[in-house]
Image (cartoon, grey):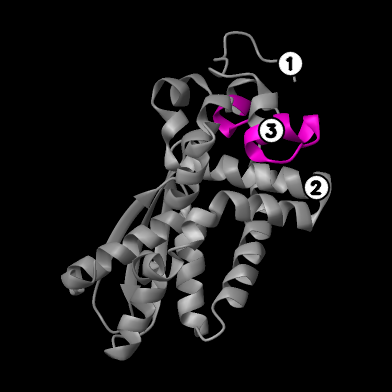
Amino acid sequence: MARAKRLPVPPRTDLDALVRAWGADIDPGLLSLALVHRSYANEAGGIANNERLEFLGDSVLSIVIADRLYRDHPEVPESDLSRMRAATVSQEPLAQAARRIDLGAFISLGKGESQGGGRDKPSILSDTFEALIGATYLTHGIETARRVVLAHLDFLLADAPSRGQHQDWKTILVEYAQARGLGEVSYEVEGEGPDHQRVFTARVLLSGVSGPVGEGRASSKKHAENAAARDAMERMDPESV
C-alpha cells in the first residue's frame, strides 16, 4: 500500500515479524488494510480503513470465545458466561494481548494519534487486534482464526471466571436494578469530535430513578456505556467496584 506523503510511518514496517508473532499468514492486502486506523485514512484523503475488518473480527472473536467458555464451563449459567466473555473480549484485555506482539508499532496512524500516544491507546490496539482476526478469517476461515484467537487469549481465559465478576458492568447493573426494583436500564449516548477522533459520552438511566445514575466517556459507544454502568455501580454500591 502506497503511503501518503507527510504522514507518519509506523516505527515498525517488518510485517513478516508481525505475521510470525500473530501465528498465521494473512493475505497481504488484508494485512495492510487491517493496520490502517481511520485517523490515517482520513488524513490520507479518505482511503479505506480497518473498521469493516474490525466489525467482522469482533463477531468471529465473540463466537470463538463463547464456544470455548461454553465447553470449558458446563455448569456455569448464561449470565456468568456472558460476564466471562465480556471480561475476555473487552477493550483493555484485547489491548493487553495486542501489546504482547507489539502491535501498536505496526499501525498506520494520523499525525494527531501518532503524536498523542495512540500506539498504546487501548481502543486503537483492541480495534486493530479485532481487524487482524477478521483478516485471518477471510484468509483461512474459522478454524485457523479460532486457533490464533485462542493462542493469543489463553492467558485471559485462564482466569475468566474471576475477571468476569467485575468487568461486564452493563450486565451487573441490570441484575442490580432488577433485584432492587429500580426499573429498566437505558442509555443516552452523544458523540462529539471529528470521525477519526470521535468521543462518546453515555449516561445511564433507571426508569425507577429520577435523572442519570452514571456517566462514562470512551472512543466507542459500547465502551462508553460500560463505563457509565461502572460509574453507576460505584455510586450506588461502592463495595461492588
* Residue occupying image coordinates x 67% and y 36%: 34
* Secondary structure beneath label 2: helix
* Secondary structure beneath label 3: helix
The disc, 3 or 1, on the residue closer to the chain's N-terminal end is: 1
User: Where residue 114 appears, x then y in whole percent?
Assistant: 46, 22
Q: Bounds of the magenta span?
A: 20-41
| Magenta stretch encompasses residue 39 | yes
Q: Residue 138 bears which disc, if any?
A: 2
| Magenta stretch encompasses residue 173 | no
Q: Which residue lies under the disc numbered 1?
A: 2
Task: Please state which amino acid type lies under the numbered disc 2.
Answer: Leu
| 190 shown above or below 98 | below
User: Where residue 19 appears, x then y in whole percent?
Assistant: 69, 33
203 or 163: nearer the eye? 163
* Secondary structure beneath label 1: loop
Can I make out residue 49 in this image? no
The disc, 3 or 2, on the residue closer to the chain's N-terminal end is: 3
| 154 shown above or below 10 | below
